[in-house]
Amino acid sequence: MKTEMIWLTAFIVWGLPLTFYRSRFRKIVYQTSDWKINIKPVFRKEIRALFGNIYPGNLNYIRTRNFYRIYLLVYLLIFTGYSATSKTNNNKNMALQIGDIIPEIVLKDQNGKWFDLKKETAGKNVVLFFYPKDDSQGCTKQACTFRDQFQDFADANAIVIGISGQSVDSHSNFAEKNRLNYTLLSDEGNKVRKKFGVPTNFLGMLPGRVTYVIDKSGKIVYMFNSQMKFEEHVANTLKFLKTNNL
């Protein structure tokens, strides 16, 4: 945890000069002194200017571009270090690991009906994925990828179930909007999430994203923990199921 805090501190501190140089760079690239250029959603010319040389004779542009490149590179290295450390610590801090039997899960689904995981999935493998929030970009992409490969999981004798802390109404809207063809469980208060020990990221501000494969006996046989690799949760889990023929 101490190492993670060091990386996070460096990430925040290094972001200050990076912000300064990016502001200067954007003003030069778009040839304006207006501070509003920093919040305008225009990026194409900035990217060309960063990786190319759009003003060959402008020494101020070239010097600022080079400083910006250096600060951006270091920032990316720090972010990589923080992400790797955070992931390692998160895996260690999980309450449940491969080989553990999952606790009882009885929650309401997106239709407001009580769903007893053990009873409803008897004789099946379960793919249980914890996700941060309905309707966020990453969660929508992940949920829809599970939707599109639903039959592949069914062929592997597995039932897909999503779970997060939003309400039944939120889950209902999310499922209807994206035509989800599997169960979403409402874990309001994050009681089940805490039992599993699913980690949070960025100092507890962002709920973690972890997918578990649970065999017919209720034992965890595989888990994939990644906040940003939305589609790999689906691909890696399906690959595990097919490879191991559970």
Image (cartoon, rainbow, N blue to C red):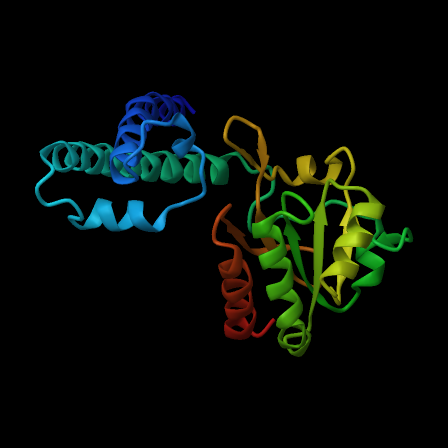
Specify the quadrant of the image occupied by residue 218. bottom right
Q: Residue at x 27, y 36 (%)?
A: 31
Position in image of residue 123 (x %, y %): 76, 69
Which quarter of the rendered picture does the N terminus lie within?
top left
- The residue lying toward the viewer, choosing from 86 and 95, is 86
Nearest to the observer: residue 186 or residue 105? 186
Is 142 located above or below residue 241 in the figure? above
Q: Choose top left, top right, bottom left or bottom right for residue 83.
A: top left
Which residue extends farthest bottom?
Answer: 155
Q: Is residue 217 visible?
A: no
- Residue 75: horizontal and vertical position, in percent? 29, 34
Q: Is residue 82 at all visible to an observer of this figure?
A: yes
Which image quadrant is residue 192 in? Answer: top right
- Residue 165 rendering spot, x and y as whole percentages: 73, 40
In screen coordinates, is 47 left or right of 181? left
The image shows residue 112, relative to residue 11, as above or below, that is below
Whole-percent x, y for residue 140 in the image: 63, 55
Above or below residue 71? Residue 183 is: below
In-image side of 209 versus 70 (left or right): right
User: On the rendered structure, is 50 left or right of 11?
Assistant: left
